[in-house]
Image (tube, coloured by chain):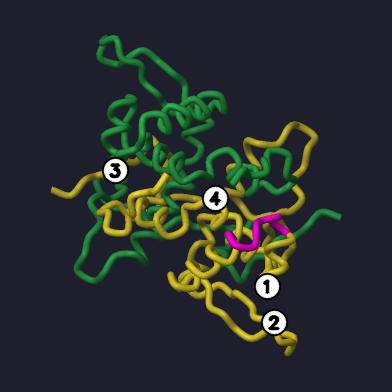
Chain colours: A green, B yellow
């Protein structure tokens, strides 16, 4: 099914999804945040068909989420590295990870990886949403206010 | 392309994406967080083919993200309302919204909606990731630590 582009949508979530809200793209980004950078590494990690991976990587470069750089080890490979725009998706990845951790593992079952504070090796706390006066906000404390 | 299910993946992000990481599903959830609850409302908002909407809603109910309830106005319509598991996706939605707001609008262009602190009507602050000692963490302050 051909999708309508949401690039021009006035909704910030729709625009975000238009840019990265695709099944494979989100998985590619997950891998990128865990340090994967080369075509064959993505391919192996995701068991993704090469043509699909190629199209997705090209789109991520066009959208300036990834930049293409020479391999960090001096070999002839290209690497796909997160730009500042890409790195700014960090909280999206953390939110997905924390929701999964809280809800999608049985008792006694442990995820294969934990996001830790690099300096201390301790797991990070849950993301927090605060009001502009510093008060913690839950869903019911918020409202989507539409422009007039 | 048939996708491999990631339901049994040891990665929390992969499991989260397996549950909600689908283009239409993420848009349906966006609508649900903005108060949309009925089949025809989703259909109108998203211009989504009815058969696709039907399959996605059914999956969201099976996965206990949505519960089906009688219409809140006493009419014969059914409503799809977020369960506690669904509501727990709040930070995923906020992270997508804030990334879109920060990066995908031109100067002078304004999103159609703002997430505000209900009590005060003021826009919320950016999501924060903290260490367990309360220190603010940026991407480079963190590390994905794999279990041995």
Q: Do the residues marked 3 and 2 share a common chain?
A: yes
Mark 3 vs mark 2: which is more N-terminal? 2
**Counting residues from the N terminus, which is met first, the one under dot 2 or under dot 4?**
4
Which mark, by number, is residue B77? 2
Counting other residues with Cα less than 10 Å from the Cα at mark 2, is it few (<14), some (14-19), or many (20 or more)? Answer: some
- In what element is the residue under mark 2? loop
SS class of the residue under badge 3? strand
Give the mark nearer the N terminus: 3 vs 1: 1
Where residue A84 appears, as percent x and y from the top left, is: 50, 29
Query: Given contact means CB atoms under 8 Å apart, are the residues at marks 1 and 2 in contact?
Result: yes
Task: Give the CA separation, mark 1 to mark 2.
Answer: 7 Å
Q: Find the distance from the CA under tag 2 to the CA under tag 4.
A: 26 Å
Horizontal side of A35 relative to B74 (left or right) equals: left
Kindly indicate the quadrant of the structure image that contains residue B52. bottom right
The range drawn in magenta is B45-52
Give the total number of marks visible in the rendering: 4
Q: Earlier in the sequence, mark 1 or mark 2?
A: 1
What secondary structure do most residues of the magenta stretch adopt? Answer: helix
Q: Which residue is mark 3?
A: B144
Checking the image for residue B38, the label placed there is: 1
């Amino acid at each position: 099914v051909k999708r309508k582009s949401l690039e021009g949508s006035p909704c910030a979530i729709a625009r975000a999804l238009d840019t990265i809200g695709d099944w494979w793209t989100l998985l590619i980004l997950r891998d990128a945040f865990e340090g994967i950078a080369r075509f064959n590494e993505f391919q192996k990690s995701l068991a993704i068909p090469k043509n699909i991976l190629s199209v997705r990587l090209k789109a991520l470069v066009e959208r300036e989420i990834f930049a293409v750089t020479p391999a960090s080890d001096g070999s002839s490979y290209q690497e796909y590295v997160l730009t500042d725009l890409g790195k700014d998706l960090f909280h999206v990845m953390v939110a997905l990870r924390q929701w999964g951790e809280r809800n999608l593992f049985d008792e006694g079952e442990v995820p294969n990886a934990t996001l830790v504070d690099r300096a201390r090796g301790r797991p990070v706390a849950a993301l927090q949403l605060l009001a502009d006066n510093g008060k913690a906000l839950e869903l019911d404390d918020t409202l989507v206010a539409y422009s007039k």
